Image (spheres, grey):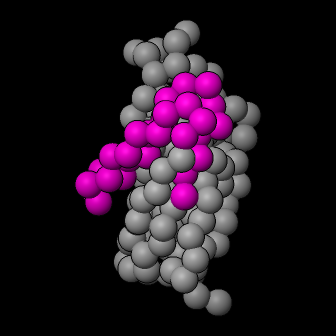
Amino acid sequence: MRRGGLEPERLEPSHITISGLPANFHGRKPVSAKRSVEVEMDDSYFSPTVLLGKPGSQVVVDLENDGIRPHNFSLTQQGIDVDCGVSAKGHVRVTFPHSGLLMFFCKYTATSGMRGGLLVRRPK
């Protein structure tokens, strides 16, 4: 089966569900609005997959495509749609939701599990 085609490829054994859709899981990371966070884009995943932040906070996501295909970072609710060619880098500023989770995805390979999420950190 072809990545990004009509038929999805198999998911990795460590996949999770984000907003009801499967995502290959490559970790979670707490982030701070005062710093940027590096996110690797590979051929079927984002690493880290889940970013944890404070409600309403903004953070710059530094994207690096380590895959052999072009990838994309899309966050529909915030009008973000950034392409990242092979071995290319990009940057996006995202805002954490006030509660819950927002899904981001690669519009080319989401059917192969290339999805991630912005998750609000619960206060301790």
Say which quadrant the N terminus sits in. top right
Say which quadrant the C terminus sits in. bottom right
| Residue 83 is a magenta residue | yes
Say if 62 sits above or below 47 in the image: below
Nearest the eye: 119 or 45: 45
Residue extending farthest front: 88
What segment is highlighted magenta in the picture? 62-88
Residue extending farthest top: 1
Q: Is residue 109 left or right of residue 30?
A: left
Seen at 53% across and 75% down, the residue is 53
Examine the rendering and report whether any part of residue 50 can be seen: no
The location of residue 73, given as percent across then percent down, is 43, 46
| Residue 106 is a magenta residue | no
Q: Is residue 59 left or right of residue 9?
A: left
Seen at 61% across and 25% down, the residue is 68
Seen at 51% across and 43% down, the residue is 115
Q: How many marks?
A: 0
The location of residue 6, given as percent across then percent down, is 40, 15
